[in-house]
Image (cartoon, grey):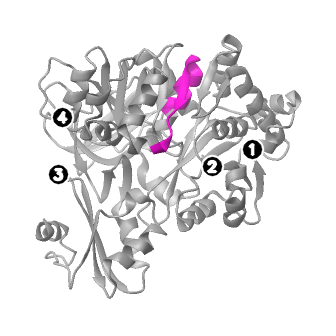
Amino acid sequence: MMYNVVDYLENSSKKYPNKIAIIEENKQITYQDFNNYSKIVGSYLGQKIFNKPIIVFMDKGIDALIAFFGAIYAGCFYSLINPELPKTRIEKIKDTLNANIVITNKEYYSLAQKYFKNLEIYQIEELKMGSIDSAILTKCYQKHIDCDPLYVNFTSGSTGIPKGVIISHRSVIDFIDIFTNLFNFRQNDIIGNQAPFDFDVSVKDIYSTIKMGATLVIIPKKYFSNPALLLDYISIHKVTVLTWAVSALCLITTFHGLDYKVPETVKKVLFSGEVMPLKHLKIWLEKLPQATFVNLYGPTEITCNCLYHVIDRNRIYKQIPIGIPFPNERVMLLDEKDNLIKHYQQTGEICVAGTALGLGYYNNFEHTNNHFIQNPNNFNYLDMFYRTGDLGYINEFNEIVFSGRKDFQIKYLGHRIELEEIEKAIMENPKVTRSCCVFDKQKEKLYGFYIGNIEKKELHIQLTKILPNFMIPTKLIKKEDFPMTKNGKIDRNKLLKMEV
């Protein structure tokens, strides 16, 4: 039985030492070299720290993965911070993690010194020049247990503070073992990575690759603004698996990319993050008639996914279901009184239990206790589950169908976003007196309404300094006042109707 994800790497590097493990745009690395560099980094870190967070501050790539596995070999856990994030958000994540060590590269070293004052900052290029200390690595390995944290990924937070979801080794091992078996991943697969490394979709790419001894092709971010280059890159590298956000797949079909070139080596397409528009799925199905397509559902808090639906090419869909539970995961629908829903078509909140459940939110017990709770239908023993805040119902095929959000958290551009965090960012401007964000699900547009003495252009510039691009409203709208409901709350539906 496995207790540590480094066993994936150890096994694959022994089986396939000279095989290419990871391909970046202009470089590649074998399993043996990748494992050795990871051990070198782990040997250095293991002298200094154990079971603590290590910040990885660089773009996704081979060196970022070496930093990840170096942290793991040292018995620590990693959290990638994208250098492109606004300074304010980086500082909030840094304060939440309260880490002592940052691993960066030459490109971002000066920026790291600016953002992470009083922390130990190391360049990955220099760390890789060290040597392996087997005694230290063995000591760290023996002290480790499978419920120790593996990584922390940050999502949007309603208080304006990003929430750091903690995922353990056991959760990833449990999920990846099932995931790769269920969808028939093989050693000869070539996995085309789209997701950023601070987004949990990438967890499936990274650990499926390392477990199976497959090859990971890291697709440069810039190619996703040019469908022709993107499709050329996928075809050149003979990619067989795409585990992508819906928005990335729709980018290609929106610009008729598959009319330019069909990536015929692709055999599996697994998508998640948003509801897949049927017209876009239809194009992919027609262009890749032999490929398997799978709709995946699940928040970061339950280690990637808890539900799946394999697309049936002979079935007529009105809406694609999010499907049935993965093995060893229990998915329940609860009504407003927390009673278990068993009837078809009755809507309830999607709640999840199982080994893949996360460890909560790092350094935030209040939010952890609100979302990771004891099963209200079982008080005979400790039975924890996660409240997703998503709503769903059971269809006639005994599948769960997604039907929206319970609160003001939305799915937009593949990311979960708290509308209240955007409202708080708008309100940080002293010229703004009120703010309200509304999401138009049908048009996939995010509106930011505000009252204040500031022009839209100026406010937009300010938001780019605070929020990542995917959280900036599609349109900012200045209002004289807001319509209110009978109980004194802003009437969001009326606001949206007024605009639309």
Sequence-earlier tag: 1 or 4: 1
Sequence-earlier tag: 1 or 3: 1
Quadrant of the image containing the N terminus = top right
Left/right placement of residue 133 relative to residue 54 reads: right
Q: Position of residue 30 (x, y in %)?
A: 68, 22
Q: Position of residue 182 (x, y in %)?
A: 40, 17
Residue type highlighted by circle 1: Ile
Measured in 3D between alpha carbons, the distance from the residue under mark 3 to the one under mark 2, in whole angstroms, is 36 Å
Residue type highlighted by circle 4: Leu
Q: Which residue is mark 3?
A: 442
Q: Position of residue 150 (x, y in %)?
A: 62, 39
Sequence-earlier tag: 3 or 2: 2
Sequence-earlier tag: 2 or 4: 2
Q: Which residue is mark 2?
A: 58
Q: Does the segment drawn in magenta span residue 219?
A: yes
Measured in 3D between alpha carbons, the distance from the residue under mark 1 to the one under mark 4, in whole angstroms, is 44 Å
Question: At 64% across and 44% down in the image, what residue appears?
Answer: 78
Left/right placement of residue 369 relative to residue 248 reads: right
Residue type highlighted by circle 2: Met
Figure quadrant of residue 324: top left
Left/right placement of residue 112 relative to residue 174 reads: right
Closer to the camera, 218 or 322?
A: 218
Instruction: Say if mark 4 contacts mark 3, CB within 8 Å.
Output: no
127 above or below 146?
A: below
Measured in 3D between alpha carbons, the distance from the residue under mark 4 to the one under mark 3, in whole angstroms, is 13 Å
